[in-house]
Each structure stands twice: as structure tokens, then as C-alpha cells.
Amino acid sequence: MGLLDGMFGQLVSSLGGSDPQHKNLVNSVLQMVSAPEAGGLAGIVKGFDSGGLANLVQSWVSTGKNLPATAQQIEQGLGVEKIMALAQSVGLTPDVVKAKLAEVLPQVIDKLTPDGVIPASLHPKR
């Protein structure tokens, strides 16, 4: 995973240090963006586009300034089911997961798209 591995420590620190639940959430996010069966990063971007949040997610992909996300926008872009599954898998409430993802997901997407495009390695296998 290379780039994803390098992001892990940085993202855990931004979430509040060494809390195992936060580490698990960051790990789950990194798995989500790299999982071809879930559409990878391209699938996440598509979900935000479909949810009416194209301007928001494109700010994270582009090389410009990232627009901030709210917990409600994270739920709108990812869907309730994905939020619930993440919450259950990491042992946090859905509200905490949405709040933390509002902090982390823009950073993850921004760092994975330094040239303003989604790398081929993060598109689903065809």
C-alpha cells in the first residue's frame, strides 16, 4: 500500500493520538479507499457526486484548497449503511464516526490525489 501506509501515522495523530478506536477508524478508511470491491477511491468520489456533493469532493481531489465537510455531508456522501458498518467495526457511535470522517476523509482524498486526479491504482479493477 506504500502511500497509504505512510499516511496512517499522520492521520492517527490528527484524530487524537494513540486511541485504538481512532487507529481502527483510520485503518478502515484507508482500506475503504483502496478496496476494489467497494469501488476504491473512485467509488467514494462517485458516492459524493451522486449525493449532490460534487463541488465538495472535487475540492478534495483538486490541487486547490479543500472545502471543509460536515458530519451530515459525510453521511450523505458515504451513505448510512457504510457509516453504520464503520461504526460497528471500530466500536464508535455513528455520530462520532461521521465527525471523525469529516476531519479525516478530506485529508485522505487530498493526499491520495496530489495531481488532482484519482490514480489508476485506486480505481476498481475492470
Image: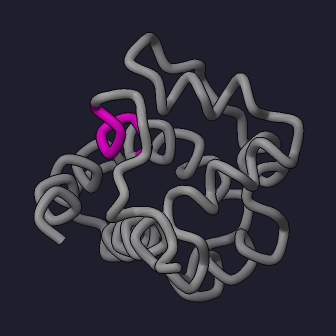
Image height of 84 relative to 12, above or below = below
Q: Residue at x 63, y 62 (%)?
A: 43
> Can you say whether 114 is above or below 72 in the image?
above
On the picture, is 15 further left or further right than 47? left
Tell me which colouring the rendered structure shows: one colour
Q: Is residue 113 magenta?
A: yes
Q: Give the overall secondary structure of the magenta segment.
A: helix
Q: Nearer the viewer, residue 11 or 17?
A: 11
Q: Residue at x 85, y 48 (%)?
A: 50
Measuring from the top left, give residue 67's x and y in whole percent. Answer: 58, 19
Instruction: Relative to 30, say whether 88 is above or below.
Output: below
Residue stretch rendered in magenta on the structure: 109-114
In the rendered image, the vertical position of residue 107 relative to residue 92, given as above or below: above
Report the quarter where the N terminus lies: bottom left
The picture places residue 18, in percent across and down from the top left corner, at 22, 63
Quadrant location of residue 28? Answer: bottom left
Side (left or right) of 100 relative to 24? right
From this viewpoint, which residue is outermost toward the front? 126
The spot of residue 116 in percent (x, y) is 40, 28
Q: Residue at x 30, y 39 (%)?
A: 111
State how many labels appear.
0
Q: Quadrant of residue 82?
A: bottom right
Q: Is residue 7 magenta?
A: no
4 lies left or right of 30: left
At 32% from the left edge and 64% from the top edge, which residue is drawn?
Answer: 121
Near-viewer residue (103 or 125): 125
* Residue sitting at the far top: 64
